[in-house]
């Protein structure tokens, strides 16, 4: 993940963010920086796979947010998505 890539990032605290991701080194270790960020706030009756397949579905609530930096150790998994995902 050395160059920017659009992805959905699932974090061990239950948060889910999406955006342009890059791995960075910080004073506390490696992190994932998410810019052009969206908070995957909630979805209803569509399932996580449905969110990935169709983020513009009316049952999906995406909320723009400031850039996020997440410690790499807190990331459960990352799902690469298309460059225009959620935009």
Image (tube, rainbow, N blue to C red):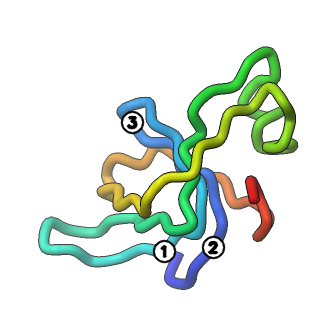
Quadrant housing residue 44: top right
Residue 59 location (% of width, % of height) = 80, 25
Q: Where is residue 70 in the image (x, y as percent from the top left)?
A: 35, 56
Q: Badge 2, how many Cα within 10 Å: few under 14, some, many 20+? A: some
In the displayed structure image, the side of residue 53 where residue 5 appears, left or right: left
Task: Please report the residue visible at 83 percent of the width from the left and 33 percent of the height from the top.
Answer: 50
Q: Marks 1 and 2: in contact by CB < 8 Å?
A: yes
The residue pinned by badge 3 equals: 12
Residue for badge 2:
5
Above-or-below relation of 10 to 7: above
Location of residue 27 by image quarter: bottom left
First reached walking from the N terminus: tag 1 or tag 3: 3
CA gap between label 2 and label 1 equals 7 Å
**Residue at the spot x=54%, y=44% of the render?**
39
Where is mark 1, residue-wise?
A: 22
Helix, strand or loop under label 2: strand
Q: In this rendering, is residue 4 above or below 36?
A: below
Percent across and percent down for residue 45 are: 80, 15
């Amino acid at each position: 993940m050395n160059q920017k890539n659009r992805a959905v990032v699932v974090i061990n605290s239950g948060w889910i963010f999406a955006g342009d991701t890059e791995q960075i080194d910080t004073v506390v270790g490696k992190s994932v920086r998410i810019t052009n960020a969206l908070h995957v706030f909630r979805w209803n009756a569509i399932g996580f796979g449905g969110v990935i397949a169709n983020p513009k579905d009316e049952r999906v609530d995406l909320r723009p947010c400031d850039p996020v930096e997440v410690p790499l150790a807190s990331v459960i998994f990352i799902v690469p998505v298309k460059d225009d995902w959620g935009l």
